[in-house]
Amino acid sequence: MRGATTAGTMSAGVRAVTLDSADGPLSALLCEPQAGPPRATVVALHGGGTGAGYFDSTAHPDLSLLTLGARLGCTVLALDRPGYGRSAARHPQGRSLAEQTVAVRSAIEEFAAGHDTGAGVLLLGHSYGGKLALSLTATSTPDPVIAVDVSGCGRRPAVDLNDPAGTPRGLRARRLNWGPARLYPPGAVTSSAHLLTPMPPREAAGVADWERRSETLLPRIRVPVRMTFAEYEAWWRHTDEDLADLRARLTGAPRVVLDRLPGAGHNISLGLAARTYHLRALAFLEESLRRGSGTGPSPEPVGGAVPGVRP
């Protein structure tokens, strides 16, 4: 890992770094605890059309996952996925999910080889980054990953991803990505403009294939899984039936938690509910450290219509 500089504003204590991967250098943001070694490490993977800065919003002091995690004793590493950040020039068309899986696995292992990751690593993925986190743990869990936490990603899309009109744009895209403006601090949408970038073509071309691919990937996951759906999530279906379908497919995970987050839109980590979500994700990491990953599925307590779903 090497030091680096990137454009954009970073919170105090966050620094830009570069990691080596099997697919070339990847840029990243890193924040480490100031007092002693980390309890554990969070590796955060952003969604389509954003970047690592998604997890370090400066619109309000409470929003940054990087600074919150470090204050609570964890190292937080937010990667620019292949096709974004420093690697965008090397791969202007982007990379497929399978190619990103290989590259990010090697980057995580390279980071872990040179840094104290504490008692283990939580993969935290948003939207397309959630697909990548699930793919990483399904194909061959990178050492020392012990759990995966996903937001903004389901299995059944709520929009027609095969629409010949292409990716939603304009006001429709804003509604899908953000939801009501009241869910965000004043100025959050405009202050996040530097985070936004077009989704690379090769990445976009594979978006509609996720429902089919997830049928194969989800049963192969062998670590605890937590999936969060925002109240105003509009990209993915998340009825009780949809969540039951997800749970039924995660047959190999030793623990499955399906959560709903009130007062949040798709871009959870940029909204007023960001701190709540990040604290819940870090609590899930603590629970995973305490319980251990286990070797087989164990049910959550029944709550409502779907086991393990919190209101």
Image (spheres, grey):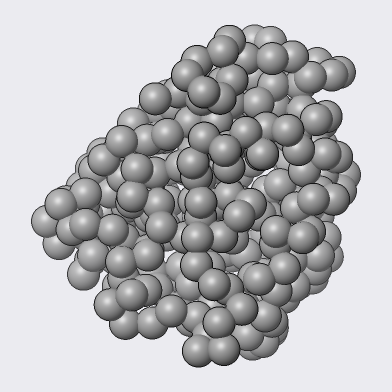
244 relative to 284, above or below: below
Q: Return the residue nearer the eye: 43 or 176.
A: 176
Q: Quadrant of the N terminus?
A: bottom right
Location of residue 42 (image quadrant): top right
Residue at (53% x, 85% y) in the render: 166
Q: Nearer the viewer, residue 89 or 83?
A: 83
Q: How many marks?
A: 0
Position of residue 154 measured from the top left corner of the image (x, y, whole percent): 58, 49
Instruction: Choose top left, top right, bottom left or bottom right for residue 96.
Output: bottom right
| Left or right of residue 218, residue 28 in this image | left
Rendered-image quadrant of the C terminus: top left
State which quadrant residue 95 falls in.
bottom right
Which of the two residues, 253 or 159, is positioned nearer the viewer here? 159
Q: Residue at x 66, y 71 (%)?
A: 208
- Which residue shows up at 38% across the image and 82% down it? 169
Indicate the position of residue 144 as horizontal and vertical percent values: 77, 33
- Across and down, in percent, residue 165 comes to 50, 89
Residue 79: tell me if it is visible. Answer: no
Residue 185: image location, x then y, percent: 16, 51
User: Relative to residue 93, is residue 189 drawn left or right?
Assistant: left
**178 lies above or below 216:** below
